[in-house]
Amino acid sequence: MAGLRERQKAARERRILEAASAKFRSHGYRSVKIEDLAEMAEVSVGTVYNYYETKGDILIATVAMEVEEVITAGAPILANPPLRVEDAILGLIYQYYDHSLEYLSKEMWRTAIAHSIEHPNTPSGRRYAEQDRRLAAQVTELIGALQDRGQVRQSLVASDLGALIFNALNQAFVEFVKNDDMTLAQLRDQIAAQILPIAHLIAVNSD
Amino acid sequence: MAGLRERQKAARERRILEAASAKFRSHGYRSVKIEDLAEMAEVSVGTVYNYYETKGDILIATVAMEVEEVITAGAPILANPPLRVEDAILGLIYQYYDHSLEYLSKEMWRTAIAHSIEHPNTPSGRRYAEQDRRLAAQVTELIGALQDRGQVRQSLVASDLGALIFNALNQAFVEFVKNDDMTLAQLRDQIAAQILPIAHLIAVNSD
DNA sequence: CTACAAAGGTGAGGCTGTTCAAGTTTTTTG
DNA sequence: CAAAAAACTTGAACAGCCTCACCTTTGTAG
């Protein structure tokens, strides 16, 4: 069985993460002090820093949980993609988008994305980048599945096309979280405008 | 003529910006203190903050000068685009990329991009976004010019295609600045892999 | 030229993320 | 079980961004 020390460690880390997730959402990332998290998690400030390297890392850890869910939510679509090319691609993208604000505020997303760009070589920066890669891989996988079905031109390289589409959906999402007034519906429209023409171009019966 | 006060103000702002540009590049953004800039510009810390709202804003101001040059450098290609669709699009993108590190380090780019995402509603955040919009508009303009020449399908909406291509070149650039080991040549290859298939699809004689 | 007003500069101090030497708890050793 | 070692927690102290009450300089009116 796990020793006392080990259990206490796990419990402390969990309490810190729960405190962060709750406070960041309710009070906003900026205005939450490490001291606040320490108090809520019933540890000292120094202990928080034994579990996470920086405040940004704590945020990334909370965001990572959500991204993991998004990736999981994408799997069913890959297993059984909608019939039409555009429905398949947009369906996957909408699935991502619709999950994105379940536990995270736009401010949290902005800060997390900014952190991952500014500190790409920290463990948390790498972690975020890795999850991005997995999302892009899902898109690539979907393209591949559509090619296997004979719906997307075989001449196209699935991974390059996947990267292109992922870039588009990712960038549109960044614009979305940058603008507090933008709705999910508007985000969908934005990405559809970019994706639909491409979907028709890459489909075999395009002309 | 401009009064003494006005001239002194302009001179101080210029000295601060020059100090920032020099020190950020030579010592790295992180390790330069506002105090250092103030000393080099021969003003007080408080004065620095009369001209720029935050340290990030000072960086954005230096980056903005470079982006302005990049936009200027793109104009000649728009005026007289290369003959083939893929050469035109990649030519414009390479022009952007080749200018990007003339006065800015990768760390400066990372920090500036992160800042613009994290603080989209500050003047400097808006300024950065506006320059992005102008770059995307150049790409759109190029697509439009190729359509006028009859080289790109008329059925495609230039602005949506421009946005798609800009997203791709922008995201590839972010990956480039996130990875200190990546070379400009590798960046070119990355974006070419995404753009070339698209260039063939959108060209009129594609099939 | 003097007096007053407006504009702007100044730097000590506040705030908050982060560190680290000292103390405490858990585990291991004999 | 006692003692020693290892692992971990703690919070005071530090660093650097930023503010603001006060002061100096410039412009203007009489």
Image (spheres, coloured by chain):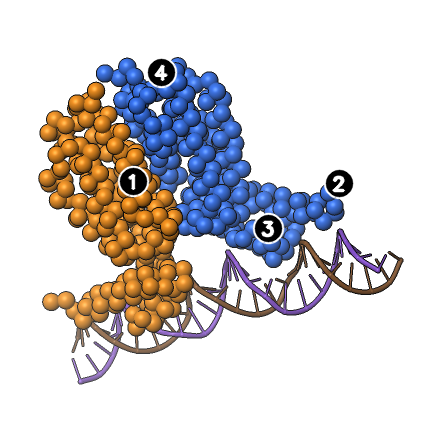
Chain colours: A blue, B orange, C purple, D brown
* Picture coordinates of residue D6, whole percent (x, y): 70, 57
What's the distance in space between the residues labelled 4 and 1, CA to CA?
Answer: 28 Å
In the picture, the quarter occupied by the N terminus of chain B is bottom left
What's the distance in space between the residues labelled 2 and 1, CA to CA?
Answer: 52 Å
**Residue type beneath disc 4:** Gly
Q: Classify mark 1: helix, strand or loop.
A: helix
- Binning the other alpha carbons within 10 Å of mark 4 as few (below 14), some (14 to 19) or many (20 upward) gives few
Q: Classify mark 3: helix, strand or loop.
A: helix
For disc 4, the chain is: A
* Picture coordinates of residue A22, whole percent (x, y): 56, 42
- Tags 2 and 4 on a common chain: yes
- Residue occupying the point 30% across, 73% down: B42
- Residue occupying the point 39% across, 15% down: A149
For disc 1, the chain is: B
Q: Which residue is mark 3?
A: A51
Number of numbered discs present?
4
Q: Which is more N-terminal, label 2 or label 3?
A: 2
- Tags 3 and 2 on a common chain: yes
What's the distance in space between the residues labelled 2 and 4, CA to CA?
Answer: 53 Å
- Binning the other alpha carbons within 10 Å of mark 2 as few (below 14), some (14 to 19) or many (20 upward) gives few
Q: Which residue is mark 1?
A: B189
Disc marking residue A1? 2
**Residue type beneath disc 2:** Met
